[in-house]
Image (cartoon, rainbow, N blue to C red):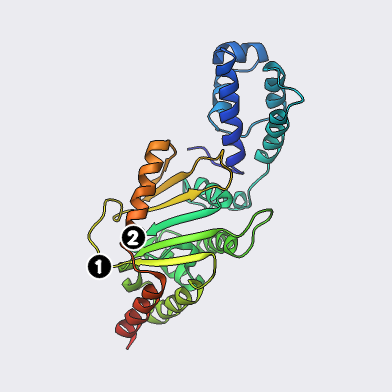
């Protein structure tokens, strides 16, 4: 997957509308590309939200499809300008694991993030010491410099829960397997502080944290980590990001995304409510650190 340096949602909007306009005009990719004196592969990338759209190309397509002066034409040009902006994560492109830039791009523009994690706690709710300890133990190939860079990235991602430019704070609905509050990451002191942090942060109005307990039955999607991103604009499709050791897999088709929404609701309904979750965390603390 090519590196994603900037916003992904404007590119998706441009792609969907340009593809629809071409199909409604009864034109092929080859015909349109030939008329605009661009390659077919470039037009295909533009219609599939790959790469950064050039304002000049979008302008030429607006003229070709005869929609100059319309509201849609104005939106297409505005989206093209926004798509060309560099995301903050581009400053860390040399350090980010493959595929994480795409995840951050989707997360940055989402209105709601529904996540499920096992056996570690949700990234957006981790403390700095927990983050460092995780990288040093679970992913020991990172240098101390890289770990500090990755820590900055996680803290910047977490800041979206407090404030964001031109949009409300991210709403987080996080479910973690009970194993995650019992898995020792770093020292007991680090883990104790992390669990205290969980209890405190989970009371924020835009954060809902639940534990999927050992007592619940195994469910289809309970064995892998994934995030379900929702967007406030009706024209933006929800996206599912499944995370494995082999990398990230993105699911965008309406049917599959709908399935994962049902999977997540199943996890949600089998998880402990927030107050019971906080009580379980306190109980785990007493067992682990008494």
x and y, in percent, of residue 173 in the image? 46, 60
Percent across and percent down for residue 21 are 60, 21
Residue at x-position 32% and y-position 73%: 182
Q: Residue furthest right?
A: 69
Which quarter of the figure has residue 137? bottom left
Q: Residue at x 33, y 50 (%)?
A: 263
Is 107 situated above or below 217?
above
Q: Residues within 10 Å of mark 2 (few under 14, many from 20)?
A: few
Q: Is residue 214 left or right of residue 170?
A: left
State whether residue 121 is above or below residue 73.
below
Distance (Cα) linking label 1 and label 2: 14 Å
> 71 or 165, which lies in front?
71
N-term mark: 1 or 2: 1
Residue nearest the viewer, comparing 84 with 237? 237
Mark on residue 9?
Answer: none
Q: Secondary structure at mark 2?
A: helix
Q: Nearer the viewer, residue 105 or 271?
A: 271
Above or below 97: residue 8:
above
Tell me where residue 135 appears, x and y as whole percent.
43, 64
Mark nearest the camera among 1 and 2 is: 2
Pick the quarter of the image with the C terminus.
bottom left
Q: Which residue is mark 1?
A: 214
- Check disc 1 and report its element: helix, strand or loop: loop
**Residue 154's spot in the image, x, y percent?**
53, 61
Residue at image mark 2: 269
Q: Can the viewer see residue 144 in this picture?
A: no
């Amino acid at each position: 997957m090519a590196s994603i340096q900037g916003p992904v949602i404007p590119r998706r909007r441009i792609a969907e509308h340009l593809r629809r306009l071409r199909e409604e005009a009864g034109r092929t990719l080859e015909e349109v590309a030939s008329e605009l004196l661009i390659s077919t592969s470039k037009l295909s990338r533009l219609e599939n939200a790959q790469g950064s759209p050039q304002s000049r190309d979008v302008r030429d397509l607006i003229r070709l499809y005869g929609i100059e002066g319309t509201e849609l034409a104005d939106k297409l040009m505005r989206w093209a300008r926004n798509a060309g902006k560099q995301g903050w994560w581009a400053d860390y492109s040399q350090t980010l694991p493959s595929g994480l830039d795409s995840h951050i791009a989707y997360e940055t523009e989402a209105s709601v993030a529904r996540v499920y994690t096992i056996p570690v706690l949700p990234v957006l709710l981790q403390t700095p010491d927990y983050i460092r300890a995780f990288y040093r133990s679970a992913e020991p190939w990172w240098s101390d410099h890289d770990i500090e860079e990755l820590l900055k990235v996680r803290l910047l991602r977490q800041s979206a829960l407090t404030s964001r430019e031109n949009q409300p704070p991210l709403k987080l609905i996080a479910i973690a397997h009970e194993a995650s509050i019992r898995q020792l990451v770093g020292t007991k002191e680090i883990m104790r502080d992390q669990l205290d942090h969980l209890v405190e942060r989970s009371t924020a109005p835009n954060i809902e944290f639940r534990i999927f307990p050992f007592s619940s039955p195994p469910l289809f999607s309970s064995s892998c980590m994934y995030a379900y991103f929702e967007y406030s604009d009706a024209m933006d499709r929800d996206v599912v990001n499944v995370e494995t050791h082999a990398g990230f897999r993105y699911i965008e088709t309406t049917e599959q995304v709908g399935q994962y929404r049902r999977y997540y609701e199943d996890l949600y309904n089998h998880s402990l409510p927030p107050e019971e979750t906080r009580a379980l965390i306190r109980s785990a603390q007493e067992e682990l650190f008494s």
